[in-house]
Amino acid sequence: MTRPMGIVLPRTSNIARLEENLHAAELVLSAEEIARIDALGTPEGRLVSPETLAPDWD
């Protein structure tokens, strides 16, 4: 994955947790770690929200 396909917007009212969240901007992943994350979206990996589990709104 060369660029993120989504972003996470953390929310907290705890100052200590906010400081921890800000340090995440300094996180650097290795090529191997990125490849492992990318693999989660494949049929062999984890599918977070399959269509069959999504609510039918219409």
Image (cartoon, rainbow, N blue to C red):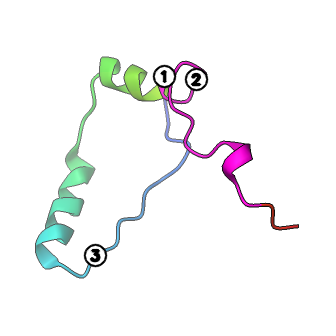
Q: Is residue 48 left or right of residue 35?
A: right
On the rendered image, what quadrant is the C terminus found in? bottom right
Across and down, in percent, residue 5 comes to 56, 42
Would residue 37 be seen by someone viewing this image from the given angle?
yes
The amino acid on which the numbered mark 1 sits, given as a three-letter code, is: Ala
- Residue 50 belongs to the span the image colors magenta: yes
For the residues bearing labels 2 and 1, Cβ distance under 8 angstroms: yes
The amino acid on which the numbered mark 2 sits, given as a three-letter code, is: Thr
Callout 1: SS: helix
Callout 2: SS: loop
Number of residues whose C-alpha sits closer than 10 Å to that of mark 1, classed few (under 14), some (14–19) or many (20 or more): some
Would residue 1 be seen by someone viewing this image from the given angle?
no
Location of residue 41 (image quadrant): top right
Quickly name the residue at label 3: 12
Q: Residue furthest bottom?
A: 13
Q: Is residue 42 left or right of residue 38?
A: right
For the residues bearing labels 2 and 3, Cβ distance under 8 angstroms: no
Q: Label 1 to label 3, Cα distance in Å?
A: 29 Å
Q: Which residues are magenta?
A: 40-55
For image coordinates 32% across by 17% down, the residue present is: 32
**Above or below for 57 versus 7:** below
Across and down, in percent, residue 56 comes to 80, 61
Q: From the image, give the main secondary structure of the stretch colored magenta.
A: loop
Quickly name the residue at label 2: 42
Across and down, in percent, residue 54 comes to 70, 54
Which mark is on residue 39? 1
Q: Label 2 to label 1, Cα distance in Å?
A: 5 Å
Across and down, in percent, residue 30 comes to 27, 23
For image coordinates 23% across by 61% down, the residue present is: 21
Callout 3: SS: loop
Question: Between disc 2 and disc 3, whose residue precedes?
Answer: 3
